[in-house]
Image (spheres, grey):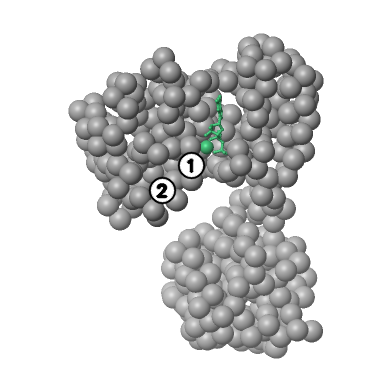
Amino acid sequence: MNLYEYQGKQFFARYGIPVSAGEAVTTVDDAIAAADRVGYPVVVKAQVQVGGRGKAGGIKLANDADETRHHATAILGMDIKGHTVEIVWIEHASDIAEEYYASFTLDRAAKKHLGMLSAQGGVDIEGVAATDPDAIAKIWVDPVDGLTEDAARAWVEAAKLNPKATDGAVDLLLKLYTAYVEGDADLCEVNPLILTPDGKVHALDAKVTLDGNSEFRHPDYEQYDATQVRDDREEEAHAKGLQYVGLEGSVGVIANGAGLAMSTVDIVNQVGGKPANFLDIGGGANADVMAGALEVINHDPDVKAIFINIFGGITKGDEVANGIITALGRVQIDNPIVIRLDGTNADEGRAILEPHLSDKLQMKPTMVEAAEAVVALATQEAAQ
Ligand code: GDP
Ligand code: MN
């Protein structure tokens, strides 16, 4: 779950991380009222889940109500990289002496948390990583040991921040680590982390991604779930409880298991096609789940052919085959379908599907052959 900046700052504040006081609003009048309460000067900040808002004109300083009106009017409704601004965050403006970068993410290969800290903040960190990788100080934190104050201090020193920022940065980074771990975040990024002229260290921006699977531990994360930015397809899939990610291509993908679904997306690409989505129907590929998955894919106008890739495990191949046949009886599908069925009871499953096969419902023995067939069909359909 991706949080808006204002939600990220509210999340940070719960862990004692210093952020500016502010209010999220959706109208110009509310922006002016909020600015009054927050205290001038204020910054009017577009709330969209993409970076580079500053460069796009979505972040403006206002010294009085007229300026707030002017900027809020311009920013509300603005398009930033395809995202329409519906919320602005009004916060008390900070004086900036220096801008830094800090983040925590998971380094899966190292099986450790990765902290990155740089004295070159405020700018695109990918650019810094490309041109001056030594300017980013990295720390790998063993999740069992956690981040100690000594390790944090050595890390801050390695990043060569202004010595005036050392104590504040150590304190903030320890809290950021706690927020990242206890909050079940996948990413906590602060860019810029600022040093103010009076020596305070403070988070001026917040980019937070929370692990949606941790909601059982954090019932209040429901509020973030409610503000997720999803396209119509993702909205429908989410309502049906399916693990779905919309992509741009023409081959609808249904697979059981996240790993197999990702491999299916990969193989469609490898044989020259473009997947329309990632969709993992999970372990129980019964008729209801299959019908739901087919409906979501059917509602995607870009889909020209559908690839059902199932590996029978606990759910046996014959049950899956029956599920597919029942689902196809319920959902009217116009696009051709290619099935690959393997694993437990695959032979029984294939025997069930066999009498139903046609030009529009094909079955292939291997994943590669199925991918080639479905991409050929999608290409053919697109040409018609
Ligand atoms: P982003 O462009 O989407 O990453 O948005 P940020 O929140 O990082 O803001 C971009 C830039 O605007 C920052 O790097 C600052 O230079 C500037 N900025 C944001 N808030 C303030 C503020 O309170 N005071 C001042 N002086 N500049 C700010
Ligand atoms: Mn930023």
Residue type of the residue flagged with mark 1: Val
- Counting residues from the N terminus, which is met first, the one under dot 2 or under dot 1? 1
User: Is 296 left or right of 255, judged from the image as shown?
Assistant: right
Near-viewer residue (371 or 106): 106
Label number found at residue 128: 2
Q: Position of residue 202 (x, y in %)?
A: 44, 23
Q: Position of residue 325 (x, y in %)?
A: 66, 74
Residue pictured at 43% horizontal, 37% vertical: 121
Kindly tell me whether mark 1's CB lies below 8 Å from ligand 1.
Answer: yes
Near-viewer residue (119 or 178): 119
Depicted 246 relative to depicted 377: above or below: above
Q: Is residue 291 shown to the viewer in this render? A: no
Depicted 382 relative to depicted 71: above or below: below
Label number found at residue 79: none
Q: Quadrant of the C terminus?
A: bottom right
Residues under numbered marks 2 and 1 in contact, where contact means CB atoms less than 8 Å apart: yes
Residue pictured at 67% horizontal, 22% vertical: 62
Q: Tell me where residue 119 sits by quadrant.
A: top left
Q: Position of residue 321 (x, y in %)?
A: 58, 74
Mark 1 falls on what kind of element?
loop
Q: Tell me where residue 181 sits by quadrant.
A: top left
Kindly tell me whether mark 2's CB lies below 8 Å from ligand 2.
Answer: no
Residue type of the residue flagged with mark 2: Val
Residue pictured at 56% horizontal, 17% vertical: 21
> Alpha-carbon neighbours of circle 2 within 10 Å: few (<14), some, or many (≥20)?
some
Label number found at residue 123: 1
Residue pictured at 48% horizontal, 61% vertical: 258
Task: Give how far apart the Cα atoms at labels 2 and 1 are.
Answer: 8 Å
